[in-house]
Image (cartoon, grey):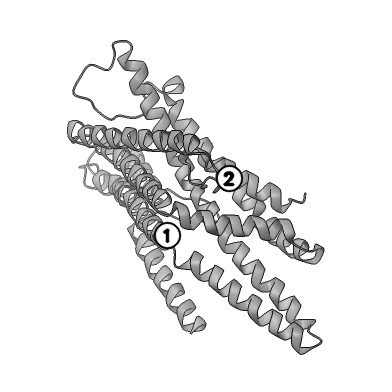
């Protein structure tokens, strides 16, 4: 299945529409911009109240480690979303210029340029579509959680008032469901940034093709000028605070979330193997053969610890894996940096 450049832009634009991350065109009316800003700041305010409720929930459920971890993950995701919202709004004019230039170039592209651009689109389309659908399925799963789980609201945040009365319950449910979906929209912003970076790379490849077909000095000068324009465009993308800071936030969130899962996974390994030690320490030598059999069964079964793993991806989630992940990541980036230099 092949995807067109226009389809890629349309899909990406739609995937981040709930956070107004795709800037409106320069000819957008003031009235529409006003309503977009009202919606944006309203969503941002709802996110802030959600963060306060999550913080209160962590305090109320401070003795329940499972709830604490879940609430911390939701809080980190919401904070990341808020940062991305502010950056996209702050950089609206710059993003507007970058995106409109991209759209104009695609509209005016020659057939061979269209072919190269579509090659990039089809290279990453399945990944972007899969990730975006996965993001929204995750948000929908949280929003519809009370239908399948023994809980009345999507998460365990706490409020200083009764949430069971009507219409308070409906308002709180809407707030939590909305933030869940908006957080997934914030994750889809990564695909928007990737689209811009892919496009910048495609422009360089198009120019490389043109250099190969130079026949005179006029063509050379034209290509040199075009090269300068592409460099300027690429620098605008790479120098955007929205791009650099976004990836910084994502890296921090990813490391924290991995640690939040690695720590209890390590504890699970230790506790599951500790059962064998506890059984061995029982006074079972002077008891019946049946007890011997049961103790030996426990010791044998505890030889294989309970692990959290994803076959073919994560062998066993633990603090050891976490440290090896960080070490490998730093090694890869160091090698890549040395290679680039």
Kindly indicate the quadrant of the structure image that contains residue 10.
top right
Report helix, strand or loop for mark 1: helix
Question: How many other residues sit within 10 Å of disc 2, few (<14), some (14-19) or many (≥20)?
Answer: some
Task: Look at the image and tell me whether residue 162 can be seen.
Answer: yes
Classify 70 as above or below 212: above
Against 34, is 265 above or below? below
**Front one among 119 and 38:** 38
Q: Earlier in the sequence, mark 2 or mark 1?
A: 2
Q: Nearer the viewer, residue 63 or 237?
A: 237
The label on residue 84 is none
Between the residue at mark 2 and the residue at mark 1, the CA separation in whole angstroms equals 20 Å
Which element is circle 2 on?
Answer: helix
Relative to 75, 20 lies left or right:
right
At a point 81% along the width and 62% down the height, the residue shown is 111
Q: At which x and y percent is residue 173?
A: 37, 22
Instruction: Say the numbered circle drawn on residue 13.
Output: 2
Q: Which residue is mark 1?
A: 247
Q: Residue 317 in the image: state x and y as whole percent.
A: 40, 54
Residue farthest along the bottom direction in this orientation: 217
**Residue 194 is at least partly visible in this image:** no
Residue positioned 46% across, 83% down in the render? 338
**Residue 262: where, in percent of width, then height?**
35, 52
Dot 1: few (<14), some (14–19), or many (≥20) neighbours within 10 Å? some
Establish if 305 lies above or below 119. above
Residue 32 vs residue 307: left or right?
A: right
Q: Total marks drawn?
A: 2
Horizontal side, residue 29 vs residue 169: left or right: right
Name the spot of residue 234 as percent of width and height, x first: 54, 69
């Amino acid at each position: 299945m092949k995807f067109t450049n226009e389809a890629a832009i349309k899909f990406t634009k739609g995937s981040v529409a709930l956070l107004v991350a795709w800037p409106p065109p320069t000819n957008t009316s003031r009235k529409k911009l006003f309503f977009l800003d009202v919606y944006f700041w309203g969503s941002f305010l709802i996110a802030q109240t959600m963060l306060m409720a999550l913080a209160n929930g962590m305090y109320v459920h401070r003795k329940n480690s499972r709830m604490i971890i879940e609430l911390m993950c939701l809080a980190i995701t919401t904070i990341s979303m808020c940062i991305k919202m502010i950056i996209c709004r702050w950089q609206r004019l710059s993003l507007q210029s970058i995106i409109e230039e991209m759209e104009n170039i695609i509209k005016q592209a020659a057939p061979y340029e269209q072919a190269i651009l579509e090659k990039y689109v089809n290279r990453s389309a399945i990944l972007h579509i899969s990730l975006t659908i996965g993001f929204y399925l995750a948000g929908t799963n949280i929003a519809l959680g009370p239908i399948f789980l023994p809980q009345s609201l999507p998460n365990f945040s706490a409020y200083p008032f009764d949430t069971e009365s009507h219409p308070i319950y409906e308002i709180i449910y809407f707030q939590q469901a909305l933030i869940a979906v908006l957080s997934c929209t914030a994750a889809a912003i990564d695909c928007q940034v990737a689209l811009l970076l892919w496009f910048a790379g495609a422009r360089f490849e198009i120019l490389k093709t043109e250099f190969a077909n130079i026949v005179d000095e006029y063509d050379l000068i034209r290509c040199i000028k075009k090269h300068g324009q592409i460099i300027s465009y690429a620098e605008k993308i790479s120098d955007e605070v929205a791009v650099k800071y976004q990836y910084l936030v994502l890296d921090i969130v990813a490391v924290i979330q991995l640690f939040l899962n690695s720590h209890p996974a390590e504890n699970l390994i230790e506790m599951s193997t500790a059962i064998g030690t506890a059984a061995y320490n029982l006074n079972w030598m002077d008891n019946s053969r049946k007890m011997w059999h049961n103790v030996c069964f426990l010791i044998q079964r505890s030889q294989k610890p309970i692990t959290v793993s994803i076959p073919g991806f994560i062998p066993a989630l633990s603090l050891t894996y976490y440290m090896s992940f960080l070490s490998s990541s730093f090694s890869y980036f160091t090698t890549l940096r040395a290679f680039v230099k």
